[in-house]
Image (cartoon, grey):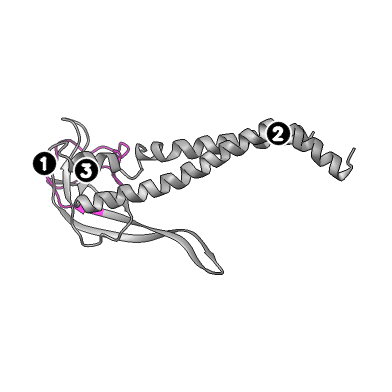
Amino acid sequence: MKLLVFRIFAVFLLVCGLICLVFPLAYLFMPNGPMLVLDTRAYFGGGTSENVPEVRQVNCTAEEYGTNTKGGRNKMRMWNCLIIPGGVKPVAKATEAEPPPGLLYAPIIVGDYSSTTLVRQLPFDRSGDLPTLWNMSGEGDPPLYGVIWNGKELLSRWSSWGLIALLFWGFGIASLWAAKVGWRGGSRAARTMISRTGIQ
């Protein structure tokens, strides 16, 4: 029975470890992820600057992760930033389809203009710091904008992602190692525990 418990726990650790190893990379390409790959492509000249609106407002709100401890605060702060462009001439009729990746809302036609609101999660507060948008969508596709502040800002975002990825990978490797030990040594540990406690 104890061997079965060890094996179940080992499988649980294996699944957790694999998730931790895969998640940081998968997160880069999720529709509601950090959009780092898209913005990096835009920074290095991908897409086009044609038919791109100017940003008229950036509003950021803080979001904290972690817990308060007796010795102090063990929290990481990220900023959820809404990037509000000005209007541009619409290229297609508005629909109620799902918003494209990186957009908080689907395109909305207002008179002769369409507006979109983009969202980015950043390591620093960028309220009032207006970025440049870059059109990354193909011809006839819904608008998909890369957001560019500067190289330093982009590097800070990659650094933040890298730190989080290292934490996930470290925990994932530790979980896989523990799963391996638990799977191979479960029966031995169970026998040792039984002999020490005298449980029949």
Question: For numbered disc 3, what is the local secondary structure?
Answer: strand
The residue wearing badge 3 is: 146
Across and down, in percent, residue 4 comes to 74, 32
Q: Earlier in the sequence, mark 3 or mark 1?
A: 1
Q: CA distance from mark 1 to mark 2?
A: 60 Å
Q: Between residues 111 and 138, which one lies in front from this camera angle?
A: 138
Magenta highlight range:
83-112
Q: CA distance from mark 2 to mark 3?
A: 51 Å
Across and down, in percent, residue 42 comes to 19, 41
Q: Which of the labelled discs sits on residue 49, or is there none?
A: 1
Q: Between residues 75 and 3, which one lies in front from this camera angle?
A: 3
> In the image as oriented, which residue stretches furthest toward the bottom?
71
The residue wearing badge 2 is: 185
Q: Which of the labelled discs sits on residue 40, or is there none?
A: none
Across and down, in percent, residue 50 comes to 9, 40
Picture layout, residue 144 above or below residue 121: above
Tags 3 and 1 in contact by the CB under 8 Å rule? no
Amino acid type, callout 1: Ser
Q: Main secondary structure of the magenta part?
A: loop
Amino acid type, callout 3: Gly
Picture layout, residue 34 above or below residue 56: above
The residue depicted at 28 percent of the width and 54 percent of the height is 82
Q: CA distance from mark 3 to mark 1?
A: 10 Å
Amino acid type, callout 2: Gly
How many other residues sit within 10 Å of disc 1, few (<14), some (14-19) or many (≥20)?
some
Question: For numbered disc 1, what is the local secondary structure?
Answer: loop
Picture layout, residue 184 above or below residue 129: above
